[in-house]
Image (spheres, grey):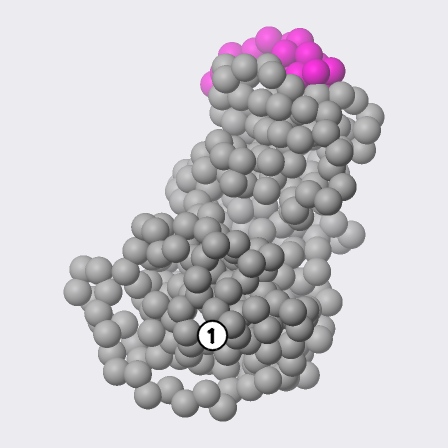
């Protein structure tokens, strides 16, 4: 057990933070390590689970050069490759494994998961094989643990360095979302709460697909105007699919929707934008960092088709990724679609 003896400390605005929790972070990549640092700054005791012993050893040395090169980690993160040790006595769990690996991770965690504590989803995506949102996977495997999601415009390197960042924490239980947001907030990390869990998940998942589209357009040299059109019309598709899932429009206009979309579609720091950029340049894609938008594109296109939702950009990204069409062919097809009024959406 990790001893919790921190006193209350203040955050921006003078609001008190509850006494330190024991937070388990499942995932030792860039985002998992950055969130572990954020939890330390918020006054919590942190154990981080990583499968790779080399990553564990590096974090114990105060670095994670494979995922966060050049960033020194402040002391306090207890890293382990033993998932039971990471979860022992935890008050809260942050699941930071990639979306397509979440089911396996939760299955491994289930025997050791403390009853009743919240599990916060920090990855973004839709399960490729089932079309399930990540919250549904948690509810299936860990029905006794309330589920929440942390999302918003945030690069791991910015959070790790302690640069100002705003995110949203969502849960169906409004009180739980507010409590988590208060506990996670610290200097330079502002957490808003939201009870529209589905809306936050949809925004986080689909923005990755549109980031690939934006990167591909840029990589193919089609110009800033084409990129702006791609992002804007992508947001229209995001709203259509979000509405079909019951997401609230104001959620999609917020940090986890439009905010995350704008960040992810405008910088090569985004793995999905970088993947699209390489795609547009015609470069070799093997060896690139994981881009969660790749598996999400295929399942999102299938969901849109099954529900009769007009989502031509998502369909085009899926077709590009499976090699059916080229980036330029996709853009030509999009530009020659039947004309209609912009408000007819």
Which is more toward the observer, 299 or 243? 299
Q: Is residue 344 visible?
A: no
Is the residue 138 above or below the residue 215 in the image?
Answer: below
Residue at (33% x, 74% y) in the render: 43
Which is more toward the observer, 186 or 183? 186
* Direction from residue 60 to residue 186 in the image, left or right: left
Residue 120 in the image, given as x and y percentages of width and height: 51, 65
Q: How many marks?
A: 1
* Direction from residue 325 to residue 258 in the image, left or right: left
* Direction from residue 238 to residue 22 in the image, left or right: left
Residue 163 in the image, given as x and y percentages of width and height: 34, 51
Q: Which residue is mark 1?
A: 77
Is the residue 270 above or below the residue 228 in the image?
Answer: below
Say few, some or many: other residues with alpha carbon within 10 Å of mark 1 (under 14 / 14 to 19 / 20 or more). many
Reply yes or no: does residue 160 show up in magenta.
no
* Element class at badge 1: strand
Residue at (49% x, 90% y) in the render: 1
Residue 194 in the image, given as x and y percentages of width and height: 40, 55
Rendered image quadrant of residue 320: top right
Is the residue 126 above or below the residue 264 in the image?
Answer: below
The part of the chain drawn in magenta is 328-345
Residue at (31% x, 80% y) in the render: 19
Q: Residue furthest left?
A: 14
Residue 255 in the image, given as x and y percentages of width and height: 40, 45
Q: Is residue 234 visible?
A: yes
Residue at (48% x, 54% y) in the render: 70
């Amino acid at each position: 057990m990790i001893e919790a003896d921190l006193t209350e400390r203040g955050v921006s605005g003078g609001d008190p933070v509850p006494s330190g929790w024991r937070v388990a972070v499942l995932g030792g990549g860039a985002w998992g390590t950055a969130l572990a640092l954020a939890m330390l700054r918020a006054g919590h005791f942190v154990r981080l689970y990583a499968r790779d012993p080399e990553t564990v050893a590096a974090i114990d040395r105060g670095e994670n050069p494979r995922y966060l090169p050049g960033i020194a980690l402040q002391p306090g993160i207890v890293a382990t490759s033993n998932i039971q040790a990471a979860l022992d006595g935890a008050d809260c769990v942050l699941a930071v494994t990639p979306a397509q690996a979440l089911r396996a991770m939760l299955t491994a965690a289930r025997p050791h998961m403390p009853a009743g504590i919240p599990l916060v989803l920090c990855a973004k995506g839709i399960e490729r094989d089932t079309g399930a949102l990540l919250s549904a996977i948690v509810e299936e495997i860990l029905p006794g643990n309330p589920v929440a999601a942390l999302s918003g415009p945030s690069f791991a390197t910015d959070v790790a360095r302690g640069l100002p960042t705003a995110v949203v924490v969502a849960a169906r239980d409004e009180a739980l979302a507010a409590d988590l947001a208060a506990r996670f907030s610290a200097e330079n990390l502002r957490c808003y709460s939201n009870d529209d869990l589905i809306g936050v998940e949809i925004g986080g998942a689909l923005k990755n697909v549109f980031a690939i589209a934006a990167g591909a357009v840029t990589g193919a040299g089609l110009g800033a105007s084409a990129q702006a059109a791609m992002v804007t019309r992508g947001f229209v598709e995001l709203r259509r699919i979000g509405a079909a899932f019951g997401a609230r429009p104001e959620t999609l206009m917020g940090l986890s929707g439009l905010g995350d979309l704008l960040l992810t579609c405008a910088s090569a720091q985004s793995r999905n934008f970088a993947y699209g950029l390489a795609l547009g340049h015609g470069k070799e894609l093997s060896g690139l960092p994981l881009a969660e938008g790749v598996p999400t594109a295929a399942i999102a296109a299938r969901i849109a088709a099954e529900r009769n939702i007009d989502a031509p950009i998502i369909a085009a990204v899926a077709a590009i990724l499976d090699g059916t069409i080229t980036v330029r062919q996709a853009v030509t097809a999009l530009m020659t679609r039947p004309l209609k009024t912009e408000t007819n959406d």
